[in-house]
Amino acid sequence: VWVGGALLFVPLGLFATPGFANKMSSLYFAQDELELTQYRRKWLPHLISILLLVPDVVLLKSQHEVGATLAWNIFAIYAYIALPMAVCMMRPPGKLPLDTGDLILVLLLAVPVFTNYYTYFLPDVELKIHDGWPKISMLQLTAINAGLFVFSGLRPLRDFGFTILLNCRDLLRILTGFALAAALLLPTGVALDHFGHAPGRPRLEWAVAHLLVIFVLVSLPQEILFRGVIQNLLHARLESSAELKKYTTESQERLRLSSYPGYNAVSNMEESEDEKVAGQAADEEIDPEEVSAFSSPYKEFQDLHSRFYARGVCCWLALPTCRDWGALFISSILYALAMVDHRAW
C-alpha cells in the first residue's frame, strides 16, 4: 500500500527539480531537421498516462479487488488521466489562454482536488497517516500529477514557478504572506470561535509533522491549481486580450512608413537621390524594439513585473496593473466558491 502511496509523490518531486519541466516541454515540442516547423510528439502523452496509472494500479490491487471490479476501476482511472492529455493534444497551440480547451482542462483537474462528491463514480484509495491528519487521496494526487504534466510540460504556462529552489526573496515573500494571513485570520477565527480546545499542548515534532502533512496534501495542491494554473491563465488571458486590442488599433500608427522607395526595374535601373533618401527615412522609421514588442507582447509585461517586484517587500502588497488585481479577485472568488459544499445549495 505504501509503495503505491510513495509513487504518487514522484511526479511532484520531479517537477520541483529545476529544469525538468523545460526538458519535458522540449521533448514534447520538436522541430524538423531544417528547424523550420515545430510539431508535437503525440506518443508522449500516451506514455505519461500509462506511467501515471502505475501507482493507481498498485493501490487498487492492495484493496484486494479482483476480476471485473479491478478491471473497471483501472479503466476508469486511466480514462480520467487520458482525457486531459487528449484535450491538450487537440488544443491548437495558437489559441489564446483560457479558451475552451483550457476551461475543460481546469474543470477536469480541479474537481478531485476539492470535492469527491462530484467524482463518486471514480475509484479512490485513501491512506490514513494519523488520527486527525489529512489522508493521502489517490485520486487527488493523480489529478495534481496530471495537471503538472499538462501545464508544465505539454501546455507550458509562463511563470508557473513550481520549484524546490528558493532564494532570499522567496523566503521573504513566504514570511510576509504568513504574517499577513495570521494578522487577518487569527482575530477572525477567535471572533467566530472556530478554534477548538486541545486537551494538552502537542509535542513540537508532532506539530511540525502535522503542519508538513497539511502543506503537502492540502495547501500545495490548492496552490498549484489556483495560483499556479487558474490565476496564471486569468492573468495571461487578460494580458493577451489587452495586447491584441492595443496592437490592432495602434500597430498601423507605430509601424507606419512615411514613404516608400520607388523601384522601377524596367525603365530606370538606378534610384534617384530622392528615392534613396525616402528609402532611408522609411528604414529609420521602423524601430526594432517596436517590432519585437509587436511579435512578442509578453516580454514587456514580464520585464514590467520583474522590475516591479524587485524593488522590495513593500511593493509585493501592490500590483503593477489593474489586470493583475482582476486576475487575483476572480481567482479568489473561484477559490471561495470551490471551498463551499454546493450540495447545500
Image: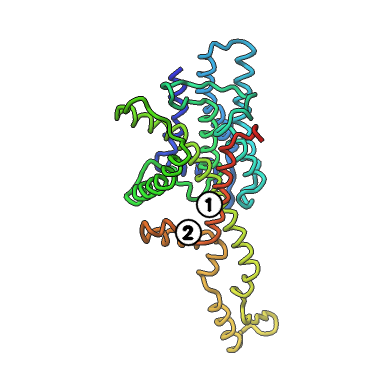
Front one among 280 and 187: 187
Q: Residue at x 67, y 81 (%)?
A: 264
| Residues packed near mark 1 inside 10 Å, few (<14), some (14 to 19) or many (20 plus) | many
Q: Amino acid at mark 2?
A: Leu
- Answer whether labels 1 and 2 touch (C-beta < 8 Å): yes
Q: Residue at x 51, y 33 (%)?
A: 145
Q: Secondary structure at mark 2?
A: loop
Q: Position of residue 313 (x, y in %)?
A: 36, 56
Q: Earlier in the sequence, mark 1 or mark 2?
A: 2
Please identify the quarter of the rendering in which residue 203 is found.
Answer: top left
Front one among 293 and 162: 162
Q: Position of residue 27 (x, y in %)?
A: 51, 40
Q: Which mark is residue 319?
A: 2
Q: Position of residue 158 (x, y in %)?
A: 50, 50
Q: Amino acid at mark 1?
A: Leu
Residue hosting label 1? 328
Q: Residue at x 61, y 78 (%)?
A: 257
Identify whether 256 is placed above or below 299: below
Q: Secondary structure at mark 1?
A: helix
Most extreme residue toward the left is 204
Identify whether 228 is placed above or below 76: below
Q: Quick one: quadrant of the C terminus?
A: top right
